[in-house]
Image (tube, grey):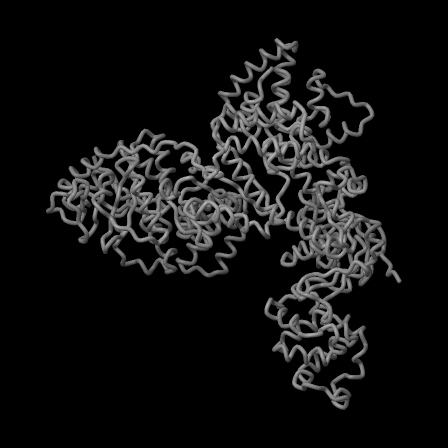
């Protein structure tokens, strides 16, 4: 039997077009019993390949190709011990460690040399280059599927080497490097008959089983005489006493729940996992690194709460442990941890240092070619004009970026392009989803009791730390538990605000002790004052907040859960029931009423599904959670079984059959989009923290937000508008007092632009400015220029500062300084006689010149905003609660109010010969064009150039249309 032993997959990055499925399907089509994978140096695709081969009832052959002592070698695992040899060699190759092959390695592997070089006197050593020798084996490289796919293989080669495909016109190196049928192999492989016997001999030797491994996690404290389970139990009871602030007579509802959870955790041998998470979170907090209150279903664990892993009391809040860890299900725990993003790396370094570099690794991910990338890559190697490629990519909608055929079907432009540029599209389609590069999982870390390279293949990753070669979904089978440490910018914001409050007001904010029922905070949320508030910023969410009017953290959680796809259709029903005086809601019975009353009879949370099945059908918590999982996974077989059991049990509990069926169907419908309450509630505390800080410490909060958004122009403009809304005075950059970042002053209730906000002003220039001694003592512009010259700041960079308004502090207009900058710069001192001879000295102090169009344009280009707009009447903004232009994309039929300053009005006519008006102007420092159709043409008579108005606008197709003129804004004196 012939098998393509040397088959590379596309995990040999940019060296093969073969997908794992191609290998499996080809073997099945050829009625082969074996299928082989042999990638170059790496084992990225090994487990995916192994699982798919087993599922297809094929015997998997796993190998690697590598070069050793000038010999190209293929090595295959005969068994699990041989697999570990491959793991070791691949790890050493990709971590740049020296290694040597020896006869012992060949006890459990097959080694094939593809060229003259090294040789071993061993029954498992073969070669594929000399058919005259007894150990000759029939091997042919396969890196594309069919003979017709050679062009695609060359395209991939050109992409890899940054060449054009025409460079490979005379290349015959991969002429027959495709998956061969046995008939083709006989024709193509030299002396096939001599080599096939040895090939079959190899196949008969291979019997590889990669079995699931037991839990493999480091011992929390290997030197301790006390075992980990006892340490965990002791820490939990100490933590519980601290949480409840009582040393003795702990409430039975807590102790029984804690013992129940501990028994399950210890029985499943997860005690070290919990202790390690406890340890790194304790390290973070001990080093003033802010950690979130909880994430995901782990917030439902009392053990996690007692260890201070989470901050939400699951007993008090009726959260469910089994949603996190189901005792009947074989699955690893998953505690995700949010850490302030600016210091997340410190916690990861702690793990690497504590548990040893060889025992900790990041997790690999793969950057895959999507439609746009494939078009760009193939376009480049085919020599296409960049404009053509850009135009094609522009017409590929994001929703079709992984399916070029669908993109073509849904675009006339792409349909035409596909006909016109057939070669481009044909090759690109075949490359979609091909791994192009490796990357690192955004949050995942794995830890191992054993050296990782003795279990799975690893390689060098970021910061020279280990990176697994297996992606996330293939690690659990080796007993490896993923720990997610996610960087959350909102925690950094909170931490920075608290530090600023301490610095300027000498107040210490303890988030555990703030008032969680603060009317002022909930009033803000009910009025949707949520710019900068985690989870609650979007325009759609603001509408829901105004409808629901939250009065508790639980309400915030409900709003977050309702504002999800699927659940959104019940928002109006929820609001109607919440505020209706006649709450005629069918709760079925008093037991289910307790479960559903907080959400007015609407199933919002997954936990409610678990509780309802317990109450109605007497399911225990694990079984209820299994039903929830069956619903979410759409497991029809499991659901049919659950339905029958549920209905029978409900009838036995006093429900009639129709009621039981109705309730089960109701659960099915809602559970499809029900949200995890543990996660939702924990995250709602972050939202509340931010809302609390924003209300009581607005200037510290908004200055911090502005600094966090300094590189995101759209966000920056939104936060500037919000600062105006809160009555904070925003000041442009000031040569004497600005620093790199936004800087606030609580006495003047103002925020000063930082130099970093000026486009073109980088770190080096800022360092030079800040290095000037006694900068705030400089009294005039000539001294400022002289000081900058001495600091080796160029004329061009000084121009940037002047154009951005940083020299306005000297009460001399910008045009005058710009016109004379060269003269001033060249003179270390400027005698009064020379000053009088400067060009335009007579208008030097006329500050109105700064409002000239060209100077304002400089300012707008450099700052992304017109400083004059910072002085818009705050009372008007507060009165109308105008919305930032950020939310234009979210306009709906209700429309929003905006503040708009008109630049000019153009009139035109439609195809139907009706008048149409285009109004260009500024909304929150952003230039946009509004449209007034003929039905509202009367509005135009009340609009004047250079005046400001409050307008109600809506979105209609691609137009932002004016629906109503609310009021004109008069300048406040």
Picture quadrant where residue 161 is located: bottom left
Q: Residue at x 61, y 38 (%)?
A: 308
Outermost residue toward the front in this view: 225
Q: Is residue 550 above or below residue 693?
A: above
**Residue 884 coordinates in the image, percent (x, y):** 73, 52
Q: Residue at x 61, y 78 (%)?
A: 792
* Nearer to me, 921 or 191: 191
Q: Is residue 610 left or right of residue 930?
A: left
**Residue 304 coordinates in the image, percent (x, y):** 59, 34
Q: Is residue 642 left or right of residue 832?
A: left
* Nearer to me, 759 or 462: 462
**Residue 800 coordinates in the image, percent (x, y):** 66, 72
Outermost residue toward the right in this view: 973
* Nearer to me, 814 or 414: 814
Question: In the rendered view of the protein, which quadrant contains the N terminus?
Answer: top left
**Residue 736 coordinates in the image, percent (x, y):** 73, 71
Residue 346 in view of the camera: yes
Picture quadrant where residue 134 is located: top left
Q: Is residue 655 above or below residue 713?
A: above
* Nearer to me, 897 or 218: 218
Question: In the rendered view of the protein, which quadrant contains the C terminus?
Answer: bottom right
Q: Residue at x 48, y 39 (%)?
A: 221
Outermost residue toward the bottom in this view: 833
Residue 915 in view of the camera: no
Q: Is residue 729 left or right of residue 535?
A: right
């Amino acid at each position: 039997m012939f098998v393509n032993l040397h088959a590379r997959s596309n995990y040999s990055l940019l060296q093969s077009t073969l997908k794992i499925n191609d290998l499996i399907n080809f073997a099945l089509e050829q009625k082969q019993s074996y299928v082989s994978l042999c990638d170059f140096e790496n084992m990225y695709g090994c487990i995916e390949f192994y699982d798919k081969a087993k599922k297809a009832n094929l015997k998997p052959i796993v190998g690697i190709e590598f070069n050793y002592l000038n010999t190209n070698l293929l090595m295959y695992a005969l068994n699990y011990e041989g697999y570990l040899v491959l793991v070791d060699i691949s790890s050493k190759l990709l971590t740049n460690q020296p290694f040597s092959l020896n006869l012992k390695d060949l006890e459990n592997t097959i080694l094939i040399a593809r060229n003259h070089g090294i040789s071993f006197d061993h029954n498992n050593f073969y070669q594929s280059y000399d058919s005259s020798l007894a150990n000759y084996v029939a091997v042919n490289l396969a890196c594309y599927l069919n003979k017709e796919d050679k062009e695609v293989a060359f395209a991939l080669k050109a992409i890899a080497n940054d060449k054009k495909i025409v460079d490979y016109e005379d290349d015959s190196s991969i002429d027959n490097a495709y998956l061969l049928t046995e008939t083709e192999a006989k024709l193509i492989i030299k002396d096939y008959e001599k080599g096939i016997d040895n090939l079959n001999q190899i196949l008969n030797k291979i019997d590889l089983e990669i079995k699931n491994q037991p839990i493999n996690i480091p011992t929390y404290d290997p030197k301790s005489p006390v075992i980990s389970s006892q340490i965990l139990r002791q820490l939990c009871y100490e933590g519980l006493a601290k949480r409840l602030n009582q040393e003795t007579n702990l409430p039975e509802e807590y102790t029984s729940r804690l013992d129940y959870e501990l028994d399950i955790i210890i029985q499943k041998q997860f005690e070290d996992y919990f202790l390690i998470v406890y340890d790194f979170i304790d390290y973070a907090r001990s080093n003033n690194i802010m950690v979130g209150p909880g994430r995901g279903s782990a917030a439902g664990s009392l053990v996690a709460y007692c260890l201070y892993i989470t901050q939400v009391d699951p007993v008090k809040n009726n959260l469910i442990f089994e949603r996190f860890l189901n005792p009947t299900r074989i699955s690893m725990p998953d505690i995700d941890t949010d850490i302030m993003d600016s210091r997340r790396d410190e916690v990861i370094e702690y793990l690497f240092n504590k548990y040893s570099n060889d025992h900790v690794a990041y997790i690999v991910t793969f950057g895959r070619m999507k439609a746009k990338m494939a078009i760009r890559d193939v376009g480049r190697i085919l020599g296409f004009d960049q404009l053509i490629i850009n135009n094609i990519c522009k017409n590929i909608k994001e929703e079709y970026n992984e399916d070029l055929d669908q993109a073509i079907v849904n675009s006339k432009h792409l349909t035409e392009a596909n006909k016109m540029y057939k070669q481009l599209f044909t090759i690109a389609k075949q490359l979609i989803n091909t791994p192009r590069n490796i990357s690192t999982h955004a949050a995942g870390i794995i830890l191992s009791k054993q050296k990782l390279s003795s279990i799975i293949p690893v390689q060098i990753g970021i910061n020279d730390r280990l990176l697994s070669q297996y992606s996330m979904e293939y690690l659990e089978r080796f007993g490896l538990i993923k720990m997610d440490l996610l960087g959350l910018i909102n925690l950094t914001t909170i931490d920075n605000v608290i530090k600023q409050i301490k610095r300027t007001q000498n107040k210490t904010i303890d988030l555990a002790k703030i008032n969680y029922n603060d009317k002022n905070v909930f009033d803000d949320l009910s009025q949707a004052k949520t710019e900068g508030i985690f989870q609650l910023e979007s325009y759609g969410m603001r509408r829901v907040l105004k409808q629901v009017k939250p009065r508790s953290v639980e309400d915030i959680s409900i709003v977050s859960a309702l504002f999800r796809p699927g659940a959104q259709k019940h928002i109006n029903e929820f609001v109607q029931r919440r505020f209706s005086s006649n709450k005629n809601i069918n709760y079925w019975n008093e037991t289910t009423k307790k479960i559903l009353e907080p959400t007015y009879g609407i199933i919002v949370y997954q936990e409610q599904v678990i509780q309802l099945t317990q109450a109605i059908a007497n399911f225990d918590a694990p079984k209820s959670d299994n039903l929830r999982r069956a619903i979410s996974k759409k497991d029809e077989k499991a659901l049919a079984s659950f339905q029958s059991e549920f209905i029978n049990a409900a009838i036995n509990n006093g429900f009639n059959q129709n009621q039981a069926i109705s309730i089960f169907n109701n659960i099915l419908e809602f559970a499809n989009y029900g949200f995890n309450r543990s996660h939702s509630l924990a995250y709602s505390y972050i939202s509340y923290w931010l809302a609390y800080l924003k209300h009581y410490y607005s200037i510290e909060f908004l200055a911090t937000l502005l600094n966090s958004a300094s590189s995101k122009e759209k966000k920056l403009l939104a936060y500037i508008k919000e600062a105006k809304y809160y009555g904070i005075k925003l000041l442009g950059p000031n040569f004497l007092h600005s620093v790199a970042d936004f800087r606030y002053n609580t006495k003047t209730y103002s925020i000063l632009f930082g130099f970093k906000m000026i486009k073109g002003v980088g770190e080096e220039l800022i360092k030079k400015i800040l290095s000037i001694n006694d900068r705030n003592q400089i009294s005039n512009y000539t001294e400022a220029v002289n000081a900058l010259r001495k600091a080796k700041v160029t004329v061009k960079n000084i121009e940037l500062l002047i154009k951005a308004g940083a020299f306005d502090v000297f009460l001399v207009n910008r045009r005058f300084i710009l016109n004379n900058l060269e003269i001033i710069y060249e003179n270390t001192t400027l005698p009064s006689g020379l000053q009088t001879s400067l060009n335009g000295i007579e208008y030097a102090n006329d500050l109105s010149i700064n409002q000239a169009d060209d100077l304002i344009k400089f300012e707008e280009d450099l700052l992304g905003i017109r400083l004059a707009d910072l002085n818009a009447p705050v009372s008007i903004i507060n009165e109308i609660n105008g919305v930032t232009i950020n939310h234009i994309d979210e306009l709906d039929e209700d429309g929003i109010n905006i503040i708009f300053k008109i630049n000019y009005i153009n009139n035109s006519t439609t195809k139907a010969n009706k008048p149409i008006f285009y109004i260009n102007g500024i909304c929150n420092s952003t230039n946009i064009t509004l449209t007034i159709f003929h039905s509202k043409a009367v509005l135009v008579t009340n609009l004047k150039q250079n005046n400001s108005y409050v307008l109600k606008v809506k979105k209609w197709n691609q137009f932002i249309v004016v629906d109503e003129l609310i009021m004109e804004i008069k300048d406040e004196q």
